[in-house]
Amino acid sequence: MLIREFEGGRHLLATLEHGAEIIGQITRVIRENDIRAGHLNVIGALDQAEIGYYDQVSHSYQGIQINEPVELASCSGNISLLAGQPYAHVHAVLSGMKGKVWAGHLTSGRIFAAELYVQELVGPDLIRSKDSITGLNLWREE
């Protein structure tokens, strides 16, 4: 088990661009502001999205395409370093017009409207690398 202690850093709010790709916009905000560790939340809506479900047997993500407008009913994640760069690991619960719900790793989505909140955490570098048991990029000791 890895436990690290951090201090609270900056709080950022950003309105993400209509029609842009959401993960790209989040990544841009955290990299341009040198956020190396933190927590994020997003509210808003997407007009299409892809959610990833991690298959624990094959150790691979299975993509679920959503080709309709959806609300970001819940969207949160954490920020750490992957391959030396700030990386946002984002999960979402998406709701469609008729009440259908999808949830999982948010791999992409085209923004209709979205607002991002980032809470920076200041402390030691939090580094992700591939775990030999799960196949996932998990937090590791430096």
Image (cartoon, rainbow, N blue to C red):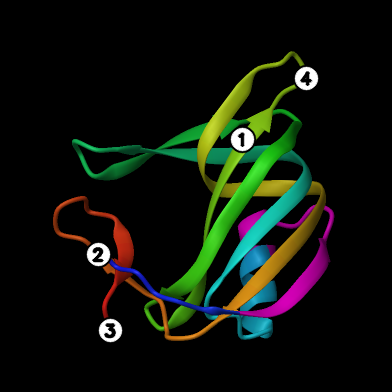
Which SS class for mark 4?
loop
Q: Which mark is residue 74?
A: none
Cα gap from disc 2 to disc 4, whole angstroms? 37 Å
Which SS class for mark 2?
strand
Q: Residue at x 14, y 53 (%)?
A: 133
Rendered location of residue 101, percent (x, y): 62, 23
Cα gap from disc 4 to disc 1, whole angstroms? 14 Å
Q: Which mark is residue 130?
A: 2
Q: Residue at x 37, y 78 (%)?
A: 83
Cα gap from disc 4 to disc 3, whole angstroms? 45 Å
Foreground disc of the pair 1, 3: 3
Mark before the other along the chain sequence, 1 or 3: 1
Mark 4 touches mark 1? (CB < 8 Å) = no
Label 1 sits on residue: 93
Q: Which mark is residue 97?
A: 4
Q: Is residue 46 above or below residue 2?
A: above
Foreground disc of the pair 4, 1: 1
Q: Is residue 141 above or below residue 79?
A: below
Mark before the other along the chain sequence, 4 or 3: 4
Magenta residues, as a range? 8-25
Label 3 sits on residue: 142
